[in-house]
Amino acid sequence: MAKRPAEIVAVRVKEARNAHKWLQTDLVKRLEELGAHGWRQSKIAKLERGEIKRLTLEETLELAAALGVKPTHLLAGDEEIAITPKLVTSGADVREWIAGRRPLVKDAAWTLALLSREERESLMRSLREAGYEPSGDGDELLFTRDAILVKEERSDG
């Protein structure tokens, strides 16, 4: 069964804390050293037990900074993630989405006209490196992989 994002963060926080050989109070101390307020050992314990159902973006970033891990490490493991009750996807898909390499929703189209030429070229290079192959010509350039379609609307401006 897919896990909600807060459940995944809880597991990943505990794993990272244990990798440091830290007690929950050690994590709180590190958060305080970084200027993060409102953290107590009891809050870390509730988080790790899955009793906290929602975390703010700020809290997630504070935890990642204190633990010395990338935010994506906390947000996306190997298990399926229920972004919403009707949107369930893999951790790998979430990491690609957060990194801006592809849309999360498989039928979404990306309009890249607002990106600079350098940003478009960088994105296209990343897509190719990730196994996406370009096809099409004219006003549209399509990248496909595993029945996922990414549409670029080209502009000369």
Image (cartoon, rainbow, N blue to C red):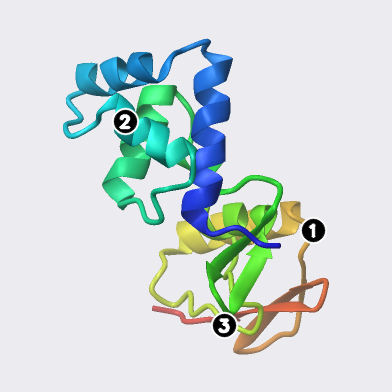
Q: Is residue 110 left or right of residue 91?
A: left
**Most extreme residue toward the bottom, as rendered?**
139
Residue 75 visible in the displayed image: no
Mark 3 or mark 1: which comes first in sequence? 3
Q: Where does label 2 land, which residue?
A: 42
Identify the amino acid type marked 3: Ala
At 79% across and 58% down in the image, what residue appears? 131
Name the amino acid, label 1: Gly
Do residues under tags 1 and 2 come within 8 Å of each other at their CB atoms? Answer: no
Q: CA distance from mark 3 to mark 1?
A: 18 Å
What is the x, y in percent for residue 4? 53, 59
Q: Which residue is mark 3?
A: 109
With 130 as the anchor, is 41 left or right in this view? Answer: left
Nearer the observer, 1 or 9: 1
| Residue 13 visible, this orientation | yes
The residue positioned farthest toward the top in the image shown: 21
Identify the residue at horizontal 58%, vertical 82% (top origin): 108
Residue 82 image label: none
Q: Position of residue 71 (x, y in %)?
A: 46, 40
Q: Secondary structure at mark 2?
A: helix
* Mark 3–mark 1 CB contact (< 8 Å): no
Q: Secondary structure at mark 1?
A: loop
Q: Is 108 placed above or below 96 here? A: below
Which residue is found at the position 42% from the left and 67% from the top?
A: 115
* Residue count near mark 3 (Cα–Cα under 10 Å), binned few <14, some 14–19, many ≥20: some
Mark closer to the observer (3, 2)? 2
Instruction: Say left or right for 130 vs 94.
Output: right
Q: Nearer the viewer, residue 58 or 129?
A: 58
Q: Position of residue 33 (x, y in %)?
A: 22, 16
Please tell me in which quadrant of the rendered image residue 104 appears.
bottom right
